[in-house]
Image (cartoon, coloured by chain):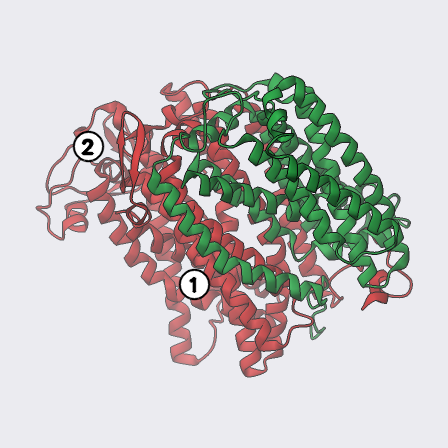
Amino acid sequence: MADAVGGILLAGITLYAVLGGADFGGGLWDLLAGPTRRGLAPRALIDETITPVWEANHVWLVFDLVIFWTAFPHAFTAVMNALALPLWLAAAGIVLRGAGFAFRKEMSRLDLQRAAGAVFAFSSLITPFFMGTVIGAIAAGAVRGDASHASLAAWTSPTALLAGLLFVTACGYLAAVYLTSEAARRGQQPMQAYFTRRAQAAAIVAGVLSLATLAALHSANPGLVGYLTGRALPLMILAGACGLAVLALLTAGRTRGTRVIAALGVSAVVWGWGVAQYPVLLPGTAVTLANAGAPPATYGALVVVFVAALLLIGPSFALLFTLQHRHLLHADHQPPSGH
Amino acid sequence: MSLGSTVALLAAGRLNGEVVPARAQMAATLGFHIILACLGIALPSVVLLAEFIGLRRHDQTATLLARRWSQAMGVLLAVGAITGTVLSFEMGLLWPGLMRRYGAVLGLPFGVEGVFFFLEAIFAGIYLWGWQRLPGWAHFWSGVPIAVSGILGAMSVIAVNSWMNQPGGFTQQGGTVTSVNPWQVYFNHAALYEMPHMILAAYMVTGFVVAGIYAAGVLRGRGDRYHHAGFAIGFVPAAILTPFQIFVGDTAARGIARDQPVKFASIEYVERTSRRVPEWLGGVYANGRVYGGLKIPYLDSLLVGFGPGTKVTGWDSVAPAGRPPVVWLLHLCFDVMVGLGFLLLLAGLWLAWEWWRHRRLPQRRLFWLAGALSGVAAIVAMECGWVVTEVGRQPWVVYRLQTTAQAATTNGGVLTSLTLIIAVYAAIGVATILILRMLARRWRAGASTEAAVPYGPPAPSGRASGAES
């Protein structure tokens, strides 16, 4: 049962990465879109694609936190204690990203829009970075099982910092791939070319950063790298193959299927990490899925909650994405001017 | 909200280290979020009510109100979602002791809440952005899941809070939880009165806040049908719920007298367990006596057990270390909450009388002044209620099982995060209010609601992305 809940947590992390991650990536491209006039078209596309979905995508983070603390409370508190600072910074980034995005939409003055937009875009950059340092620190084995105090060294190791950069790049990669498809579907050729270039660049940088992170991880936690290139090797190969496939398709000017392949590639990395660590929850400690502080009944209840969630949320998400896909959700209010 | 209490605690020298800033931070962030949570729970219903009236009666005014409120709701739901996420982080970052020991228990209602949070966010994405292109009734129904999941999600979160007041549904050995009964965790003893009390509070806060905004408009001379409708759609449901809330609150107080007698004794200034206990209205307790309060003989015993001979447990039943820190704060907050509840009831009765006699809204300026203040009053009452329940549970975080000091983080620097978060929340609070006011100004100017694209400047030929649609 603990394994099943571990799988649920990993699935939740995967969904947050491929859905929520892309929303952060959108903010990253918004940040890099240049001055007002030149950045108009990409920002408009980013805004339209993120608007109706970002809150729902964001809930995966809350869901993951809840599963983590309910099923594995000892590991959860160790992580929260040891990595308090990057987690605070990520939380601050989440607040500022959401507020900046929601506020910008309703502002009518250009200077205020710029200020809110800058907050949104900059926090879209720092949030995945600090989340990446947290995951990097855990993978490097820098979180002790009984950690009760914050550790600066834990998340400023090469592995953690590289993981932070990798997270930012992966978000940018996903967003650029999704936006390329979106632009193609809308027949916006300049935007398609614009985001294709960015997707290609991000894919290459992400590939390089993955290898660099792996190298850093090798000196920090060789055991995990052994599993990554051992039993998790098929997933690692899948991740690499997906990245190359997306690159090839985009270079050929094709967008069909790129979204799914890109998401699959990122998912393969997440699951590769999970498979490599299994059944250890905090590498370098004795904390495993089964002994992290929850009784069996908790696992059972969480599985029931997850199945109920799938039955309720699955069709709802399908409806949301279908309506968005068909352009029935339009980010523009135009009330009849009766008064 | 309980910042005052924390300052008082600090002065009393009862706590030290990170406990006080951690409590202050939790109080500040929860006190801020709870207002948005109320709006998140109940505003969808109010908007749907307006949309329903608009669709059913082909009432353009109601439809316009629904559409505009929906735009404001978009901002409020976003701010509510992110401030709620901060609380999730704080559960671990501020209270690792609580989560380490009881995460496997109190996490279960949070898991259920997560499902409803999803539904809320998904259907909000459909409802808020579907105004233009979804047909009328289909659009209306896309909003119903938001309202329903708002209520069910709120029940789940309140289940956690009431579990902290009446922990049950699990067994533990040597500080480790060994088995859990999720059903008993969720429907714990206190849930039965806390859940309806808070959900009704959310509807009252939302209804009166909406009404207050339009009442203020009427006071400024905008007494047209649009403002009257905006007022009534908020005020009438909230006013109808007020007597039910008073009944539920009275039941809850008796529940607390039974379940958490020391909290109740502090609320009611009951020093010694005794019969024929008087009720104090107002007054500050210090040095063993009450200054400035109105004493009503026997009333407390009557309220608790319907007879003057009812025995009420005093705070002398536990050692001083087991009592809440500042009883006068609890007592006054309770009195303010109850007092405001009755004032809101009076305002509702006034409207009911006027409608019964004359089939119209009251004309007197005093009524509209009361209406304009009703939103603030409801918020203050709700915050006071949270001070009572949270400060009243002290020194426990999980009643009689874990103290707040045991739960708090040992990491330094909470004072820093507290300072920063107050600054950020103040900015977000001010920005939210300014944006809502800006929206209102834009609506009054009759303009279309939104700049075309982020970062303007308005494209010369309509929307820059217009080509695609």
Q: Earlier in the sequence, mark 2 or mark 1?
A: 1
Measuring 28% from the left and 47% from the top, which residue is drawn there?
A: B184
The quadrant of the image that shows the C terminus of chain B is bottom right
Q: Chain of mark 1?
A: B
> Is residue B125 among the parts visible in the rendering?
yes
Specify the quadrant of the image occupied by residue B70.
Answer: bottom right
The residue carrying pointer 1 sits among few (fewer than 14), some (14 to 19) or many (20 or more) residues within 10 Å by Cα, namely many
Q: How many marks?
A: 2
Q: Chain of mark 2?
A: B
Q: Left or right: where does residue B218 sit relative to residue A338? A: left
Mark 1: secondary structure = helix
Badge 2 and badge 1 both on one subunit: yes
Give the residue number, with chain letter if any, for mark 1: B238
Residue A272 position, x and y percent, is 61, 36
Measuring 62% from the left and 66% from the top, which residue is drawn there?
A: B221
- Chain B tint in image: red
Q: Left or right: where does residue B411 sit relative to residue A37? A: left
Q: Are marks 2 and 1 in contact (CB under 8 Å)?
A: no
Measuring 42% from the left and 30% from the top, which residue is drawn there?
A: A292
Mark 2: secondary structure = loop
Furthest-bottom residue in this view: B57
Is residue B68 positioned above or below A259 on the image? below
Is residue A124 positioned above or below B338 on the image? above
Measuring 38% from the left and 20% from the top, which residue is drawn there?
A: B15
**A258 and B218: which one is in front?**
A258
Residue A122 position, x and y percent, is 74, 37
Residue B461 position, x and y percent, is 90, 65
Give the residue type at disc 2. Answer: Glu
Q: Left or right: where does residue A19 sit relative to residue B11? A: right
Query: What chain is the green one?
Result: A
Give the residue number, with chain letter if any, for mark 2: B271
